[in-house]
Amino acid sequence: MLKKINFILNIVIGSFIGVFIGYTIYVFWDYKAHSDLYATQSAPWYTSILIYGIVTFIILIVGTAMKMVIRKRMK
């Protein structure tokens, strides 16, 4: 059972990293294509990337902590 949970955590962690990288590439591309739209905003164009990065980092910390607990119990 613990191996299955560990495998699912690996998938979740990898998925969040992949989504973050994809979102970052998309926002950068959109900024390069439509920089005039971002100029009208009061916040910098990369603010949404920072927010997604913080959320992804928190999820990675929680996932890694769970993996460490699982690894300790498997021994």
Image: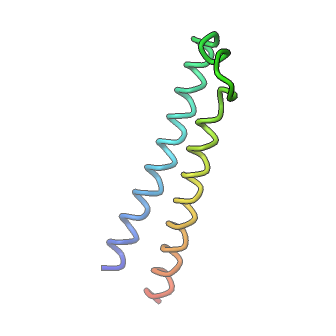
Q: Position of residue 62 (x, y in %)?
A: 53, 67
Please tell me which residue lies in front, 38 or 75: 38
| Residue at (50% x, 66% y) in the render | 63
Residue at horizontal 41%, vertical 64%?
Answer: 9
Q: Is residue 54 left or right of residue 19?
A: right
Please say if 23 is above or below 15. above
Q: Residue at x 64, y 41 (%)?
A: 50
What colour scheme governs how the chains and residues are painted in the rendered image of this protein?
A: rainbow
Instruction: Identify whether 6 is placed above or below 39.
Output: below
Residue 20 in percent (x, y) is at 53, 42
Q: Is residue 74 left or right of residue 28?
A: left
Question: Residue 20, relative to residue 30: is it above or below?
Answer: below
Asked whether, in this view, residue 15 is left or right of residue 33, the answer is: left
- Which is nearer the eye, 40 or 66? 40
Residue 5 quadrant: bottom left
Res 12 → quadrant? bottom left
Give the side of residue 69 with respect to residue 41, left or right. Answer: left
Q: Position of residue 68 (x, y in %)?
A: 53, 77
Residue 30 percent location from the top left of the image: 55, 19
Quarter of the image with the N terminus is bottom left
Decide which of 72, 28 is in the foreground and name it.
Answer: 28
Q: Residue at x 64, y 13 (%)?
A: 35
Total label count? 0
